[in-house]
Amino acid sequence: FEPKIRTASTGDKTSFAYETARKRWPIIITQAIDDVYRTTGQTDDAEKREEGKRIINDLATLKYEVQHDRALTPIPDDGVSDVATYNQILESLGKPTWLNVSWLFSECYLYRRISTSFALSTHWKNYDIFARQKIKTFRSSRPAVLELAARYKDLITQLRSHTGETSEEADKLLFTEMCEICLWGNATDLSLLTSLSYEDIQKLQGSEARKKSEANILVNDLEEVYKQLVEAKKAGKTARVVDIVLDNAGFELYVDLILAGYLLTAGLATRVTLHAKSIPWFVSDVLPGDFGALLNALAAPVPFFETATEEEELQGKTPEKLSDKEKEELSFLFQEWSVLHAEGKLGLRANRFWTGPGSFWRLVDPNADEQTKELAEDLRKSELVVFKGDLNYRKLVGDAEWDPTTPFTEAIGPLGPGSGINVLALRTCKADVVVGLPKGMDEELRAREGGGGDSGARKWAWNGKYAVVSFSKGA
Ligand code: F6P
Ligand code: MG
């Protein structure tokens, strides 16, 4: 249940993995250490402080092992069964060292191992080391959050008041725009933030940026997806579920909810299920608690957006006040989403499967555990399963070195036609692998400025500037 061709490795100088393992992982671990150090300093509980020191020590050891290219060691048993799977795969890889190992496996292992340190404690079991960063970045997404809140309110009000015939063309356009908003929300995840400033993020998020980016969607199957949803509606199916396998918290989750709310209001789905991770994952991925945190921020936007951060205080800056109109628009969003949630039309689930090692091909492995089998069954009943983001895409295609013209339906292996699962990937490119491109496009993109030229590296695909929207019908 993995592709038979070679997967990206941290030892490959032309891969984004090379830089990630050497530069970005040490920064991410250092930030994690700083976070635990800070929380340890804020607690009066001596036992919790002691445990905090032990966790800091674990993290420092991990950082040392990464930087000094030591072997990956078996993950200690923390009571969750996926440890066994991780350790089996680790064994099957021989004795790999950090700087020359499958990128996909080692990066998943990194976050899984970090979570064990917390799971084995008493006072830090559910601690999210990335929560501070996630909240801070969501605050700094304020301009785009406000812009979209206004647009959403307008749109939902129009959808509700519209009674006569609508043109199919206009409906399709709206659907496309909503999906593209949701797509570009993925461009600014926190594991890449080690090299992006907050100003950069804001530039990437507004509607202007989106318009300019349309040409950067290299593959776009949204027409087919729209057809799929409309046909199910016309066929009079009463229960039509759309599943969204979430990626990042904060702004990206916000745009995911915008898409979910739109699909429900437009009648393109009768229920939307969001799938979150169960452990802190790739820095910014959504944990169930992030969903509540987002709704709380919308419910009480004044303390959230108007309270100065420590940094702002030091710089003598005070955040601008929200206008009455802005407060009203945020409160509209809160009302809409909490009602959908309360009515059971919008749900959130976590499953350990999403934080397993290796590819998503294992979802349909007949030897998978019961929990995974149930998940696969649920997804088969869905009209559409949307996979958000780069890592989910890498897991769909097994992070293998596919020729970029390989059809998406082939690169997702057993998840392709015949699997019963309708797969849609909304992905901004932040890694090497890419499939489904027309012949010659990869070469053309490499030849552009910063695209990698003849270095052998597919640099154009590393920074979220380009995107692919790929669909595979499961029937
Ligand atoms: O650490 C780098 C990286 O692993 C990417 O290349 C990766 O796939 C990404 O982080 C996470 O991106 P996303 O949040 O879109 O899945
Ligand atoms: Mg992510």
Image (tube, grey):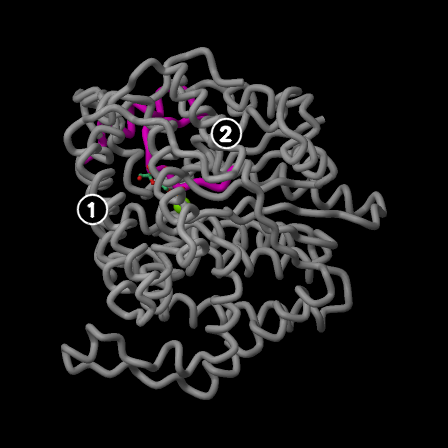
Q: Secondary structure at mark 2?
A: helix
Q: Nearer the viewer, mark 2 or mark 1?
A: 1
Name the residue that disc number 1 marks.
Answer: 27
Q: Residue at x 25, y 47 (%)?
A: 28
Answer whether residue 169 is magenta in the image. no
Residue stretch rendered in magenta on the structure: 425-451
Q: Position of residue 178 (x, y in %)?
A: 54, 55
Q: Residue at x 47, y 16 (%)?
A: 3
Q: Residue at x 65, y 34 (%)?
A: 422
The quadrant of the image that shows the N terminus is top right
What amino acid does circle 2 point to? Leu
Pointer 2 or 1: first along the chain:
1
Between 320 and 282, the one nearer to me in the picture: 282
Visible in this render: residue 122? yes
Quadrant of picture, ligand 2: top left
Q: Is residue 346 above or below residue 337?
A: above
Q: Position of residue 63 (x, y in %)?
A: 21, 39
Ligand 1 is within 8 Å of the C-beta of the residue at disc 1: no
Q: Residue at x 49, y 41 (%)?
A: 426
Name the residue that disc number 2 marks.
Answer: 396
Q: Is residue 225 above or below residue 213?
A: above
Q: Kindly indicate whether the residue at mark 1 contacts the one at mark 2 (C-beta within 8 angstroms).
A: no
- Which of the 4 image quadrants contains residue 358? top left
Q: Secondary structure at mark 1?
A: helix
- Which of the 4 image quadrants contains residue 108? top left
The quadrant of the image that shows the C terminus is top right
What amino acid does circle 1 point to? Ile
How busy is the neighbourhood of tag 2: few (under 14 within 10 Å), some, or many (20 plus)? many
Between 226 and 242, the one nearer to me in the picture: 242
Q: Position of residue 197 (x, y in %)?
A: 21, 57
